[in-house]
Structure formats: C-alpha cells, structure tokens
Image: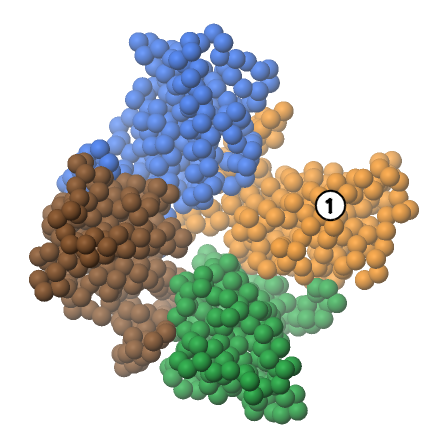
Chain colours: A orange, B blue, C brown, D green
Amino acid sequence: MTATTLDAYPDAVRDAVARARERVSALHAELPRWGLVVWTAGNVSERVVVDPDAGPGERDLLVIKPSGVTYDELSPAAMVVCDLDGTLVEGTRAPSSDTAAHAYVYRHMPHVGGVVHTHSTYATAWAARAEPVPCVLTMMADEFGGDIPVGPFALIGDDSIGRGIVETLRDSRSPAVLMRNHGPFTIGRDAKAAVKAAVMVEEVARTVHISRQLGEPLPIAAEHVDSLYARYQNVYGQR
Amino acid sequence: MTATTLDAYPDAVRDAVARARERVSALHAELPRWGLVVWTAGNVSERVVVDPDAGPGERDLLVIKPSGVTYDELSPAAMVVCDLDGTLVEGTRAPSSDTAAHAYVYRHMPHVGGVVHTHSTYATAWAARAEPVPCVLTMMADEFGGDIPVGPFALIGDDSIGRGIVETLRDSRSPAVLMRNHGPFTIGRDAKAAVKAAVMVEEVARTVHISRQLGEPLPIAAEHVDSLYARYQNVYGQR
Amino acid sequence: MTATTLDAYPDAVRDAVARARERVSALHAELPRWGLVVWTAGNVSERVVVDPDAGPGERDLLVIKPSGVTYDELSPAAMVVCDLDGTLVEGTRAPSSDTAAHAYVYRHMPHVGGVVHTHSTYATAWAARAEPVPCVLTMMADEFGGDIPVGPFALIGDDSIGRGIVETLRDSRSPAVLMRNHGPFTIGRDAKAAVKAAVMVEEVARTVHISRQLGEPLPIAAEHVDSLYARYQNVYGQR
Amino acid sequence: MTATTLDAYPDAVRDAVARARERVSALHAELPRWGLVVWTAGNVSERVVVDPDAGPGERDLLVIKPSGVTYDELSPAAMVVCDLDGTLVEGTRAPSSDTAAHAYVYRHMPHVGGVVHTHSTYATAWAARAEPVPCVLTMMADEFGGDIPVGPFALIGDDSIGRGIVETLRDSRSPAVLMRNHGPFTIGRDAKAAVKAAVMVEEVARTVHISRQLGEPLPIAAEHVDSLYARYQNVYGQR
C-alpha cells in the first residue's frame, strides 16, 4: 500500500476526518465488548461529508477499519480513509474487504452516515436460513419498526453486497438487514447509531430464537408496532 | 429539561435522596455485570419515603436512571428524582421512559421499596410466548415461592404497564412478573432486593428453558415448594 | 451469631485452619470466574483433620463460606469453621445453609477432603429432569469414569441432602452427583479437586446437552471408558 | 522429570526456540480469552525447524504447553521443548499428554508449523455425533473451503490420534478436524494460524448449530464456496 494523504482537501475536511477516526476507532471496541465479533471479523465505518452541495456519491469520504487487523491493534491512526469508490485516500494499510459494500450504501442512501457489518452469531444463524426475525418484542418494535428483513446471497468482489443491502433496506423501517448465508449489516445517521443497531439486531435475533425454541412467540398487532416505533423514534432518550 | 431542586423538602429527605442516588447508581452496574442488559436498556429505581404518616402515593419520591444514557455514564449525580406522578423533582435529564410504570407500582404497593426492569434474554423469551416459568428448581421455590407469572400486553405511555404489574403480582409470592412481549419487572423491599430478583429471574428462566429443551422437567410438589419458600425467606443469610 | 474460637485446639490445627481459610476463600473466586454461580449462590468447603487416629466423623473440622454473602465480600477471615455436626467453631457469621450436607459427606466419606455445591446452569438443567449425563466424551471418561449420576429429591434442613449425595456417589467413580431439581454437588481429595470437578461437570453437561439438541451423541464403549479413566487418573499432569 | 538442555543444538536453533516459547506462551492466552477451554484443557504447539535440508520428521523440535498446568501459570519459561518423537529436549515438566498427536502431525505434514487442540463446546458437540459441520456460511467458505470433517475415534497413548488427524486433513482444504467423541484439532503454517482456526471452528460450529435448531440452513453452491475460498486465501488482510 502506498501512503496517500488528504493534502488536496480543505482544512475543515481534514479536521472532520480526524474526528471521525477517533469515533470509528472507539466504536470498534463496542463490537468485541458486546460479543459480536471474533478475531479480526467485523467493521464500522462513518461518512465524512466533503461538499454539502454535491450529490452524496460524488465527493464524500469514509473512515473504516483496515483489513485483517485485530481489535487490540486498532487506534485512530490505524483507521483508513477511502473515497466512495473504495479507493484509498489516506492510510498505509489495505482497507477492510467490505469497503465496497459500505461505499455503495453511502453512494445510494444519502441519509446514512454510518455502516456496521458483523457475523454476530444469532443474526447470522437466521441469515443462514434466509429467515426474517419476526417482530414479537416491544424492543424490536421500538428499534426496528417491524421484522428484520433478509437480503440476497451475494459474492464479495463487486457491487452485489452493497446493492443487496440498499434494495432490502430502501423499503423497510429496519436499520438492519440479514445478508443470506453471510451476516447482518446495519445503518444509522452516524457510526454510533449503526453500532447500536448492530448490538440490538443480535440481541433481538437471540431473544426471538430462544423464545421460538420452545413454541411460537405471540405476534404484536401491526398498529401496536407502529405506535411503539413512532414513540421510540420521537420521545426516547435525551432531547 | 429544566433543572429543579429539592429545596422545598426537609433535610432528612434530601439526605435520604442523596443516599438513594448512591445505591441506585451502584446497583445499575449489576445489570450489565450479570448480562441482563445491552446498550442503554434496563433501569433500577428506589422509593424515598417523605412522610411516613401520609399514604404511599401521596408524598414519596423515587430515584431512577435517566432515559437513553449508557451504563458507562452513570453516577449518583446523573440519577434523577421524580415524584410518584412521574414528574421530575431533581435532575437535569429526562427520567427513564419506564418511570410511569415504576411510580404506579410505588403508589399501589406500599411495601415495595425498589423496582427493576430489564429485557434479559431468557425471561423475555418466556414473556414473548406469554408462558409462566414453572417451579421445577429448589432455587425457584426458595426465591419465587412458585411459578413466575405473566402479565398482560401493555403499551408504554399511560398506566397500562404499571397496572399490569400490580394486578399480576398482587396475588403472587413471586417478586417477578414477565410482561407479555416485553420483559421482566421485579420488585423488592429495596432496590437491592429488586436487583437480586432480576438476576434470579433470568437465572431460573434460563435453567428451566435449557432443561425443557431435552424433555420435561419434573415438578416439585406444592407442599415442598411451600416449605422451601418459608425456610428461605426466614432462615437464609445473616440475621 | 456469637463469636467462638479455636482456643481449645492444638497449634497445628489452628495453623491448618488458617491455611484452609486461604485456600477456600481463593477457590470461591473460581465459581464466578467459570460462570457457575450468580449472586450469593454456591459454596466450597475443605476438611481439616484434627486427630488422624480418630474416625473421620469424630473430631474433624470444615471451613466453608458464610450464608448469603456475595463473592465480592469473601476473604480468608470471612470464612467460617464448623465441626462435622455443623456447629460453628470459629467465625462471627452464620455458616452456609448447605453446611449440614457438606458435614454429612465428610462424616461418611473419609477419603473426601473437599466439597463444592453450585446451581450451574446445564448441570442443574439435567438435574431438573432427573436424567444422568451419558458418557459420550473422552474428557468425561477421563474425569468421571462414566455417566454422571442423579441423586434423590431432598429437602434442606436435615440429613436428606447429605445422605442422597453419599448414597449416590458411594458406588460411582464420578466425583459429581446431580441432586434432583436442585443442582450438582462435587467431591475431591481436597477443595481444589472438588472445584475442578464442579467446573468439569458443568462443561460436560453443557457440551452433551448441545450435542443432543441436534441428534444422538455416539456412546463410547465401556472398555474405552475404563482405559481412558485409568490413564487419566494415573498419568495426566505433573508427578 | 530430569531437566535437559538444548546445548547440543546450534545458536540459531536455540534462538528460534526462545522466540517460539514467547509466541506459544502468548497464544495460549487466546484459548481462554475466546472461551475455548476450561481449567487446564487445551494446548498450542509450534514447530522449530532445526535442519531445513533434513526431512521434516528427522530433526525438528516442537514447543508445547506442559501437562495439567493452569492458564494462569503459563510463561515462556514454563513451555517445554520436545523432538518429533515426543521426547523432552528442554524443560522441567512433563509435556502435554497430547504431544504425541502434535508430533505425528509435524512428522507427516511438512507444511504445518502450528497445531492446536481444544475441547471447545460446539465443535465438540458436533464431534460427539460424528457429524461434519456443513458449509452454509460465507465465513466458513472463506476459512475452511467447505465442510469441517470428522476424524475417527482414537484412544490416547499411541499414534492413533495423530494418524486420524493426518488422514482426515490430507484430503481436505479445512485446517480443522473434529475428532470423534473428543474435540477439534487445528493446523496452520504457524501457531498463530492454528489458533485462528481453533477460534473460527468454534465460531462456525456454534453459528451453524444455532441456525439448525430452528430449521435447515441453506447450502452455498460449490462454485461459490470455491470462489470465496480462493479470494480469502489470496486477497484478505495486509500483504
């Protein structure tokens, strides 16, 4: 890998990249903390807006984990910066092999500011059966607004994974998609929100799995799902 | 949120609130420690008696976690104080969105001094099927005195959850109720006892679930449940 | 609790008790470390031989955890000393409510120097169905020499639990018994060996449970179990 | 055990042994970290090449954990060195009782530089049913290139285990074999790669187990397995 630099970018962008490196590095620690990854698997990215007046795919950058590096070795400086074609812009290591999928999402979903990918156990177990997680918990209604959908089987190496994510999530309130035989991808307005969705998708995939082991969980009526979702998105937390 | 104060209350109440803030903050750490919560889910509260001569719903206060705040950020000062209508009395953050349920319990169950709510995995899995946990373990007989009951489906936003808890627990020896499609609420003479019940409800929900996966656990005769419960409540621990 | 003392005992016994307090306190930390206990559940004891020429039930002491005390509060000084009738000999707290069962084992099994009791999840799940764990793993053959047997249902408060343990283990190579609807008790030549057996009984109960969830594990021929057991007991480890 | 020394070996070999002691000691910490072992179970070894011109079985050494020693007591100095007949060459403790199996692998698979053995729960659960783990996850295709195969039942004490490992892995792309009723052995170009395979075999054994609990995971077409495997082995990570 040839080192490259952000010299051609304005100061404000370089500052924004530096802050995103801090956040993305720190947020990676949440993945092993919540048991979502082993060894070097999993990655978090965040979008850095370069020109608010340009289209989302044209100028923006993303900060992401380098490929095949363990969680113990991560630091803000170890993160790498790519443009939305997945080309390395700053950093001395190869970016995550999932960078193309992250970049595709940022190009096609302008409101998305963060993307997370893991192979977390229970979410991946549903993905291996290509079965959506049914919305039978109030915390699922709060966070996902319905079932967690399944995306297509897709090979790594071109836009297939990114396209599968975008096509599945475009018509869903869910910030999580279970890519078939692969694992979950989550999105959010920033990297922290996408990490929260990655934690929650595993939590609900696990709880519903366990509930289903001994019988059929009771559904929640659609109008109750809607009212829980509306309330949580608008009222929960600190304003 | 407007900061408010306890200036109108006697010194003894302000001291009792300060001590309750310490206890409630420290007890929140038990929830992630025992794996009962992820991210910002879950909450512990404790009653502060203001006027021992008044009815339980009239003057008392409760100390509880603020809404949507992570477990790393908790401290005695971060806790918030509400009256039993759920109105903020001291603190600068919005109280937990479950405050109304806690307050309802304190208003209607005078002997309850602590309430805990989690979405712990196995207890919530039983709740999603609306199935009580049968009393097939001596530790369940000790601690719960019988099956762990299920409460109704209830939406957040009014008294429904609190009423469901109180109506279910009023006729039970169990300090835990599994609210349908939602998760467990537990009560105790103080916050520590309610936290212990939250730890134990998950432990027994998990053990009985696992036992049932490979066959039917053997019941414990009702008279044995009674004698185990009586002994544990009166003899166990340090007097 | 009235404090009592070991003043009537020879110096060598008082020294042996002090060393046993250190070991028993340290070994308690292994129970939460390996996930075998929650809150204050579980206990470890060790025998202290007072008069090697007397029968085992006549003079020996045991060191054990006090009742209902959390694992964070344990220290050598917090342990309590009882005679083999379960009467407190040294210490200011009530002994574990399982002390009578431990004492019964020491009185009736002279070669036993340590006893451990937990409610570890998978072992207790087998116990709730009163089903022995079949010997389908080489590590089970090594450590247990066959199936892990089930003991009777027994109420706390008299010799029933101790008698159930002794009658079940007397004819078994297994250092572990699953007391019905209750949980595992393990024995060893000292407390450390009994703790190892407590760790291993949960490990094999869990692995065989999981294996059985998707089909029937293959048995190990009896002569292979015998040869694995003989080798492990005589060759493994440092001599 | 008589202490022996490497005095008869060239300086370069003694240096290589010293570095291997560091690596093997540090890598043992990964086994409890990822939950693959309890108590003293499990072991990691690494080959030290003595004479690159000799055949692999003739002169090489291996560094391995001593038998029955806890993970807390491990250090570079505590590791032991054996030749490929399993004879102790340097160290004061008995080598792991699995040393003969490791040595057999090094003698018969010249490209293998590291071997790991655990009783990790889910992999051992498949091994107890003698059932291969089917390749239904992209991460399995990446890492294992197909199903994870099962080796024969074999008693410890002669070459049976080593021969079973070698005969099973010789015709497989998988770096892991599930020895029947026993547990997984993994290989790699060095000890770190074998440890990674030990972590991954448990991860995929667990995820596929959980997926199968509620239905049948969807297979991945053979040509997709091949292309995922080829890409991962050649492109992933830092070059």
Q: Up-down: is B96 above or below B72?
A: above
Foreground pick, C181 / B22: B22
What's the residue at 26%, 46% (across, down)? C79
Q: Position of residue D92 (x, y in %)?
A: 44, 77
Q: How many marks?
A: 1
Location of residue A184 in the rendering, given as x and y in whole percent from the top left corner: 61, 51
Q: Which quarter of the rendered picture does the N terminus of chain A lie within?
A: bottom right
User: Left or right of D144: which side holds B204?
Assistant: left
Residue at x 69% of width, y 50% of height: A75
Identify the amino acid type marked 1.
Arg
Where on the picture, by quarter, is residue D17? Answer: bottom right
The residue pinned by badge 1 equals: A21
In the image, what residue occupies the spot 24% across and 36% down?
Answer: B238
Image quadrant assignment for residue A23: top right
Residue C181: image x %, image y %?
23, 51
Quadrant where the image shows the C terminus of chain A: top right
Decide if residue C177 is in sight here: no
Chain letter for mark 1, please. Answer: A
